[in-house]
Amino acid sequence: MAYRIVVTPEARDQLNAIYDYIAQAASALIARRFTDGILDHLAPLADHPGIGTPRDDIRPGLRTLAHRRRVTIAFMVEDAAVVVIGFYYGGQDFETLLGEE
């Protein structure tokens, strides 16, 4: 069974912020390639939603997946969907941010 991948509006905003940051620091082309790579990194979750690191210490059912050692992808597996709840870039303290929600 293939799971649907759902990116929450908050996660989409975070991805857009990553794009804006990289576009300003480098170029729009580099930013697009990087953020497209993040989205491509989600594809295996459709068939293997259990990959990543369980982070029940932060929130029950939370899992994380790293992308290029720069981005932490936070997600939860629900009935027939993998719900991406955040993209955290660089040194962001995602543990505190997710624990407060």
Image (cartoon, rainbow, N blue to C red):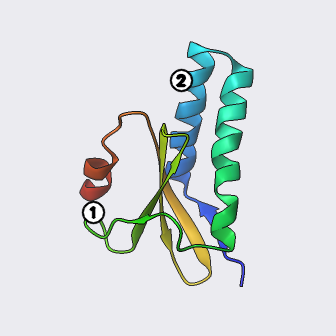
Q: Counting other residues with Cα less than 10 Å from the Cα at mark 1, is it few (<14), some (14-19), or many (20 or more)?
A: some
Residue 45 percent location from the top left of the image: 63, 67
Query: Going 25% across and 49% down the picture, which residue do you hit?
Result: 96
Q: Determine which of the numbered discs, if any, sits on residue 2 in the image.
A: none
The total of numbered circles placed on residues is: 2
Q: Is residue 38 left or right of residue 96?
A: right
Q: Which marked residue is nearer to the observer: mark 2 or mark 1?
A: 1
Spatial CA span between label 2 and label 1: 27 Å
Query: Going 49% across and 42% down the picture, which residue do you hit?
Result: 71
Q: Is residue 90 above or below residue 80?
A: above
Q: Tag 2: residue type?
A: Tyr
From the image, tell me which residue sits under label 1.
58
Q: Secondary structure at mark 1?
A: loop
Residue 64 percent location from the top left of the image: 44, 59
Q: Counting other residues with Cα less than 10 Å from the Cα at mark 2, is it few (<14), some (14-19), or many (20 or more)?
A: some
Residue 73 percent location from the top left of the image: 49, 52
For the residues labelled 2 and 1, say whether their Cβ atoms are less than 8 Å apart: no
Query: Going 56% across and 14% down the picture, which residue do you hit?
Result: 25
From the image, tell me which residue sits under label 2.
21
Query: Going 55% across and 52% down the picture, which residue do you hit?
Result: 9
Residue 7 percent location from the top left of the image: 59, 58
Q: Tag 1: residue type?
A: Ile
Q: Secondary structure at mark 2?
A: helix
Q: Is residue 38 left or right of residue 59?
A: right
Q: Is residue 64 left or right of residue 31?
A: left
Q: Give whichever of 47, 99 is nearer the camera.
A: 47
Q: Earlier in the sequence, mark 2 or mark 1?
A: 2
Assign the N terminus to one quadrant of the image.
Answer: bottom right
Q: Is residue 26 above or below residue 15?
A: above
Assign the C terminus to one quadrant of the image.
Answer: bottom left
